[in-house]
Image: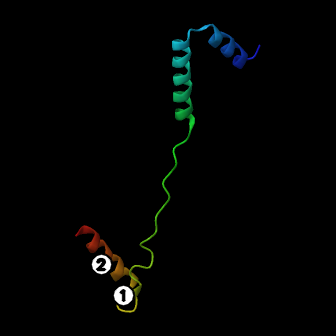
Amino acid sequence: MTVEETIIEKLHKLPPDKQREVLELVELLEKERVPKATPTLRQNWAGALREYGDKYTALELEKISLEWRRD
């Protein structure tokens, strides 16, 4: 007899309120099993300093952007 068959057999012997508890436990276990989605890396900032490219060097732009973040 497989594990699934054993569980079903035992489940049939339980009263309805206990069967409901088993169902809730199974649903809880299903939720735990589903991996959480990892957030995607947003790069909506890319190109934001393009207009300053011919006025400043890359190093100067980096320093300016760090100052903006502190504000």
The answer to whether residue 22 is above or below residue 36 is above
Left or right: 61 in relation to 42? left
Which residue lies at the image location 39% right of the left edge and 92% below the top edge?
54
The N terminus, quarter of image: top right
Between residue 49 and residue 32, name the one nearer to us. Answer: 32
The answer to whether residue 47 is above or below residue 25 is below
Left or right: 3 in relation to 55? right
Give the label, 2 or 1, closer to the camera: 1
Callout 2: SS: helix
Q: Which mark is residue 52?
A: 1
Type of amino acid under label 2: Ile
Do residues under tags 2 and 1 come within 8 Å of each other at their CB atoms?
Answer: yes
Q: Which mark is residue 64?
A: 2
Between residue 34 and residue 18, name the one nearer to us. Answer: 18
Type of amino acid under label 1: Tyr
Crowd around label 2: few <14 · some 14–19 · many ≥20 (10 Å): few
Which residue lies at the image location 48% right of the left edge and 61% below the top edge?
41
Left or right: 4 in relation to 65? right
- Residue occupying the far bottom of the picture: 54
